[in-house]
Image (cartoon, rainbow, N blue to C red):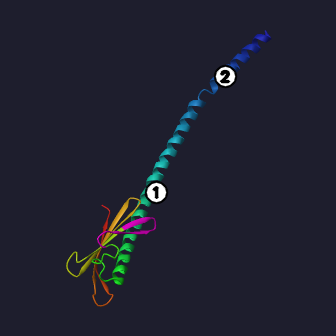
Amino acid sequence: MKTINCKLKTTNSVRRRRTTGIAALPVMLLLGGIIIEAAIAGAFILYYVNSGVYGTKLATQSSILAHAAVDDAIFRIILNPNCGNDTSCLGTGTPFTFTAGGGNAQVTIEKDTPSSGLTQITATAETLGKEHRVVAIVTTSSTAPLVTIRSIIDQPEQ
């Protein structure tokens, strides 16, 4: 009879081993799914926070680039007061490209455009899809290399 008792004990222990770990697999799958879902949600939150900050940085860069392009055009007008009518001056008729800091700006110089005696400078800068436009109105002296800035208008991307 001892052998029968041994066999009963071994079958009970085998059954116990098979049934005691049955809840571990669903619990591990559930916990793994929750951890993966939290990681994916964290990645999306991080992406949206970074894209917002990066978008603001790009908009600021394009604004600074447009202002730098207007300053460059003002220097060109100081060197050549007839810039805007003179076709040898860049920006007269067709825009010239001003490049700095990973972005480009298209600059046009138009003399007597808003009214007689005024010169309009238009700079449209783009940095990775963020666009900014600056329009400056200046007057030039015919006798001295003097440029007076009448107005500078910022027109950020709508």
Q: Circle 2 sits on which residue? A: 16
Quadrant (top left, top right, bottom left, bottom right) of the C terminus:
bottom left
Please state the horizontal and vertical placement of residue 84, each as a whole percent of the image.
28, 77
Where 149 falls versus 56 (above or below)?
below
Query: Along the line of sight, which residue is nearer the eye, 131 or 41?
Result: 131
Please state the horizontal and vertical placement of residue 87, each as a whole percent of the image.
31, 75
Nearer-N-terminus badge (2/1): 2
Please state the horizontal and vertical placement of residue 45, each as a whole percent of the image.
46, 51
Secondary structure at numbered mark 2 = helix
User: Which residue ends up furthest to the left in the rendered image?
Assistant: 115
What residue span does the magenta drawing correspond to? 92-105
* Res. 1 image quadrant: top right
> Disc 1 residue type?
Asn
Q: Residue at x 56, y 31 (%)?
A: 26
* Res. 102 image quadrant: bottom left
User: Which residue ends up furthest to the front in the rendered image?
Assistant: 88
User: Which residue ends up furthest to the bottom in the rendered image?
Assistant: 143
Q: Is residue 71 left or right of residue 1?
A: left
Q: Is residue 87 left or right of residue 15?
A: left
Q: Circle 1 sits on which residue? A: 50
Residue 106 colored magenta? no
Mark 2 and mark 1: Cα distance apart in space = 53 Å
Where 43 falls versus 154 (above or below)?
above
Q: Is residue 28 left or right of residue 12?
A: left
Residue 98 colored magenta? yes
Secondary structure at numbered mark 1 = helix
